[in-house]
Amino acid sequence: MTYQAKYRQNERLLDAYVGFLDECTNFHQKLCLSEEIGRLATQNKQIEKMEFATTKTDISIYELKIPACL
């Protein structure tokens, strides 16, 4: 999988998760889903900052480091 493919996969998941957010019945479910939405959005922001040639490389070569925001 390349970073381009990962970006597209994240976009599909983000659309699905945002649509499902209203279906969550309690605070914990909404919090967990919101955290996942934030994680995927942060990954996509990092991918957008990459050089085009890097986005075509295999994702197993690199890793995305997501800093925690408290």
Image: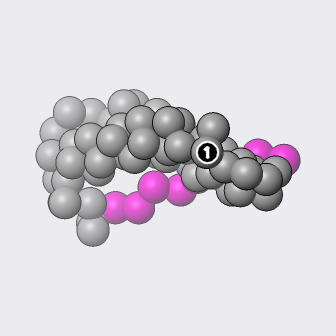
Name the dominant secondary structure of the magenta segment. loop
Q: Is residue 36 magenta?
A: no
What segment is highlighted magenta in the picture?
62-70
Give the camera-side residue of 9 and 70. 9
Residue at the location (42% across, 36% down)?
A: 15
* Left or right: residue 17 compared with residue 60: right
The spot of residue 60 in percent (x, y) is 27, 68
Taking the image as drawn, is residue 36 in sight?
A: yes
Residue shown at 36% from the left, 38% from the top: 11
Residue 52, how many percent across, how many down? 20, 33
Q: Which residue is mark 1?
A: 23
In the depicted structure, whether residue 62 falls above or below residue 43:
below
Q: Amino acid at mark 1?
A: Glu
Q: Residue at x 26, y 60 (%)?
A: 59
- Give the residue at x 42% y 42%: 16
Which image quadrant: the N terminus?
Answer: bottom left
Q: Secondary structure at mark 1?
A: helix
